[in-house]
Amino acid sequence: MKIELFEDIEYWKLARELMARVYGVTRNDKFSRDDGLREQIQRTAGAVMRNIAKGFDGEGNAEFLKFLRYAQRSRAEVQSQLYVALDQGYIPQEQFAELYELARRTRATIGAFIKYLRDYEAKSKQPKTANRQP
């Protein structure tokens, strides 16, 4: 099955959910007053989605891989910023754990597709050999 729209990609959907959840938690009273962290985590969560979309609409698998790696880096940054929010008392442990797990699932699905694309690229670059029988 060929995917026609980036919106149909499962890991983009997870990234969208992560972004929506991040925006939700940053609305709480304490978090919303920390302009620096609030803006940074919102931008970073959005970057996960944006990089997947940009890569999907790119010039082939090599470019897609590049943007998927960017998405992975942004996702890791979200996880790191979640620790700051936890340590500052902006989010409770349970909420931290839920968001962290969603980011981990996003990582796993993006990572699986990166592996698929790498394997596909490696396979397509192998020289074709004819079956010879002795």
Image: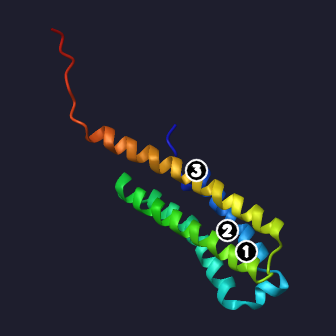
| Most distant residue in the left direction | 134
* Residue at x 32%, y 42% (from the top left corner): 122
Q: Which residue is mark 2?
A: 19
Q: Nearer the viewer, residue 103 or 43?
A: 103
Q: Are marks 3 and 1 in contact (CB under 8 Å)?
A: no
Q: Which mark is residue 109?
A: 3
What amino acid type should be assigned to the residue bearing mark 1?
Answer: Tyr
Is residue 120 found left or right of 4 in the rendered image?
left
- Gap in Å between the C-alphas at discs 2 and 3? 16 Å
In the image, residue 19 above or below residue 30:
above
Q: Amino acid at mark 2?
A: Met
The residue type indicated by label 3 comes to Thr
Q: Is residue 33 left or right of residue 62?
A: right
Q: Badges 2 and 1: C-beta atoms under 8 Å apart? A: yes
Q: Nearer the viewer, residue 94 or 106?
A: 94
**Residue that badge 1 annotates:** 23
Identity of the residue drawn at 73% across and 79% down? 85
- Count residues near mark 2 (Cα–Cα under 10 Å), then give few for <14, some for 14-19, many for 20+: many
Q: CA distance from mark 3 to mark 1?
A: 22 Å
Sequence-first disc among 2 and 3: 2
Q: Residue 102, relative to residue 38: is it above or below?
A: above
Q: Residues within 10 Å of mark 1 (few under 14, many from 20)?
A: some
Query: Going from the N terminus, do you reach mark 3 or mark 1 first?
Result: 1
Q: Helix, strand, or loop for circle 3? A: helix
